Image (cartoon, rainbow, N blue to C red):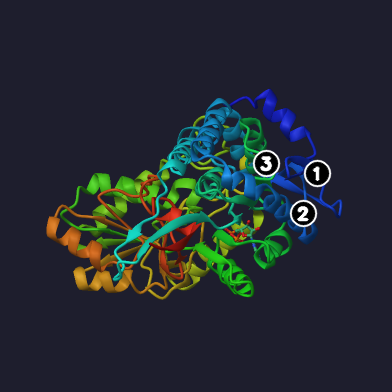
């Protein structure tokens, strides 16, 4: 059975999508547009304005104009408006989830239940923050002064987001930016611009003043690069590839913008012989294949203790073969297509290289044909017999490809898990309490999941080390990344 496309979604797709600047729908100054495709069919879904440097300049100006009044708004009022936006997201949950499914390809069930839950939860978490921001007083070594700090907004922030969770990536940055009194220019990924545009409309409907949240769709090299360069932008929060993160950090350095980077990964998941092997195998399957492997925290390197290697590999392969790959709108799809032909080609390239380098293909490895042939569908793929330095086992693929390795002991697996230049996430399955905590400390990653994987909560910081980036998203710490501390000295 297929989910019916909602009338409001049809109406949205039929409109030529414009930029949202200063509360107005405006075409790109150049008049240029681009198509966003449905990855399940490869067909055009909607036509969207292609913003460039001129549009970015207009959006930054609108955000700058809106900034003083937004920053001066009573915190309780900012809270109310952010909660109102979360309410509207609830009310339009099915519509936003369908836009995400059509634009990104992921199963509607996942978009509706998981992505929308996370996005609304994040927004509500941040909605609570404006009234909780505080400064401090200091015990200076002189009786003559009273010294305190004020936590002030940075000004105009920019969010450059990827296509894998387009709604969550937007709320994760809109929430703290606006809660702290900043205004924002959001540049969604060109592959998935639709939900962000609808979110921008809902923000206006919620009563968030024009110019506080601007959405400029466009290509990374034009609109994204212009945001990184623009002297009127005070901070860039970026989620995406390590390569683009480096470019953005370098460009942003010229104007000393604040930068936070949430980048790629090649995350290890380690299963010990004393673990609940059934639960571990099930978790390992979802750790890599959820969102068709297009997940920054994808557990793409699976290390299994030699004693249970064959058993765990067999369970993982068996479960993987049961996964249903199909269009996001089909009710029984577990995995959707990859986002684009380019991403499919890239993943297939790694599969081919893995086979050439001598890794053993245990399941998958092919593009799906038949009725799915026009879309970018790839079978979930598992290799074992992978040497640590093979491309398939070391590079971030961002697709449904798992490499499985055997390990002997703790030092061996910690060394190999940590050998990656990335350091985003790590998973650990063991019932040995001391080992679990010891290894959590030894693994080089921004997040370690023990006897679970891929859990998030808006209260818990998230981010990576090394080539996975710097700065954190989520949690209370992020408020420090969207504000500046001002020290005030008063002579008594
Ligand atoms: P992915 O590899 O997941 O597609 P990218 O890092 O290419 O991720 O893209 C993430 C975001 O970065 C997108 O919004 C994209 O448009 C943007 N982007 C791509 N290139 C640049 C660039 N040179 N400068 C700024 N933003 C960019």
Q: Earlier in the sequence, mark 1 or mark 2?
A: 1
Q: In the picture shown, does residue 293 fall above or below 44?
A: below
Kind of element beneath mark 3: helix
Identify residue for label 3.
197
Q: In the picture shown, does residue 153 fall above or below 360?
A: above
Asked if disc 1 and disc 2 are in contact, CB closer than 8 Å, the reply is yes
In the rendered image, is residue 425 in sight?
yes
Kind of element beneath mark 2: helix
Q: In the picture shown, does residue 10 fall above or below 141?
A: above
Query: Label 2: how many residues lie within 10 Å, few (<14), some (14-19) or many (20+)?
Result: some
Q: Which mark is residue 266?
A: none
Q: Quadrant of ligand 1?
A: bottom right
Residue, x 72% and y 46% (percent of image)?
A: 36
User: Does the beta carbon of the residue at mark 3 sit less than 8 Å from ligand 1?
Assistant: no
Q: CA distance from mark 1 to mark 2?
A: 11 Å
Left-right relation of 106 to 14: left
Q: Earlier in the sequence, mark 3 or mark 1?
A: 1
Q: Quadrant of residue 422?
A: bottom left
Image location (x, y in percent) of residue 211: 69, 45
User: In front: 351, or 96?
Assistant: 96
Image location (x, y in percent) of residue 421: 42, 73
Kind of element beneath mark 1: strand
Identify residue for label 2.
58
User: In front: 29, or 418?
Assistant: 29
Residue, far right: 31
Query: Label 3: how many residues lie within 10 Å, few (<14), some (14-19) or many (20+)?
Result: many
Image location (x, y in percent) of residue 163: 59, 51
Question: How many labels sit on residues?
Answer: 3
């Amino acid at each position: 059975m297929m989910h019916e496309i909602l009338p409001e979604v049809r109406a949205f797709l039929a409109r030529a999508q414009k930029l949202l600047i200063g509360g107005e729908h405006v075409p790109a100054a150049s008049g240029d547009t681009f198509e966003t495709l449905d990855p399940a069919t490869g067909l055009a879904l909607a036509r969207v304005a292609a913003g460039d440097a001129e549009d970015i300049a207009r959006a930054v100006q609108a955000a700058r104009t809106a900034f003083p009044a937004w920053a001066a708004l009573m915190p309780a009022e900012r809270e109310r408006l952010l909660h109102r936006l979360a309410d509207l997201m609830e009310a339009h949950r099915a519509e936003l989830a369908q836009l995400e499914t059509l634009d990104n390809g992921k199963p509607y069930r996942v978009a509706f239940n998981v992505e929308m839950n996370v996005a609304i939860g994040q927004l509500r978490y941040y909605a609570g923050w404006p009234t909780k921001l505080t400064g401090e007083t200091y015990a200076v070594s002189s009786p003559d002064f009273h010294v305190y700090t004020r936590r002030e907004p940075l000004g105009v922030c920019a969010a450059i987001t990827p296509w894998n969770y387009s709604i969550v990536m937007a709320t994760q940055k809109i929430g703290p930016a606006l809660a702290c009194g900043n205004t924002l220019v959001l540049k969604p990924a060109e592959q998935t611009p639709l939900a962000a545009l609808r979110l921008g409309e809902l923000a206006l409907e919620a009563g968030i003043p024009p110019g506080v949240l601007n959405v400029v769709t466009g290509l990374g090299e034009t609109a994204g690069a212009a945001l990184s360069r623009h002297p009127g932008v005070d901070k860039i929060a970026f989620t995406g590839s390590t390569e683009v993160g480096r470019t953005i950090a370098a460009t942003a350095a010229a104007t000393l913008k604040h930068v936070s980077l949430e980048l790629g990964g090649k995350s290890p998941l380690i299963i010990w012989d004393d673990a609940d092997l059934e639960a571990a195998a099930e978790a390992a399957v979802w750790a890599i294949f959820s969102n068709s492997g297009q997940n920054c925290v994808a557990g793409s390197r699976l290390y299994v203790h030699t004693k249970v290697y064959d058993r765990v590999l067999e369970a993982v392969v068996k479960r993987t073969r049961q996964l249903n790959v199909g269009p996001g709108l089909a009710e029984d799809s577990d995995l959707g297509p990859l986002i684009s032909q380019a991403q499919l080609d890239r993943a297939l390239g790694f599969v081919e290289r893995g086979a050439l380098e001598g890794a053993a293909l245990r399941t998958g490895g092919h593009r799906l044909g038949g009725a799915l042939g026009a879309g970018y569908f790839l079978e979930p793929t598992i290799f074992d017999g992978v040497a640590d330095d093979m491309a398939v086992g070391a590079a971030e693929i961002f697709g449904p490809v798992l490499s499985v390795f055997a390990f002997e002991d703790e030092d061996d697996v910690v060394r190999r898990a940590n050998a990656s230049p990335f350091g985003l996430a790590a998973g650990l399955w063991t019932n040995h309490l001391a080992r679990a905590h010891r290894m959590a400390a030894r693994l080089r990653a921004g997040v370690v999941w023990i006897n679970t994987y891929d859990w998030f909560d808006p209260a818990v910081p998230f981010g990576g080390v090394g080539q996975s980036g710097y700065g954190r998203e989520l949690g209370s710490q992020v408020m420090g990344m969207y504000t500046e501390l001002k020290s005030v000295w008063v002579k008594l």
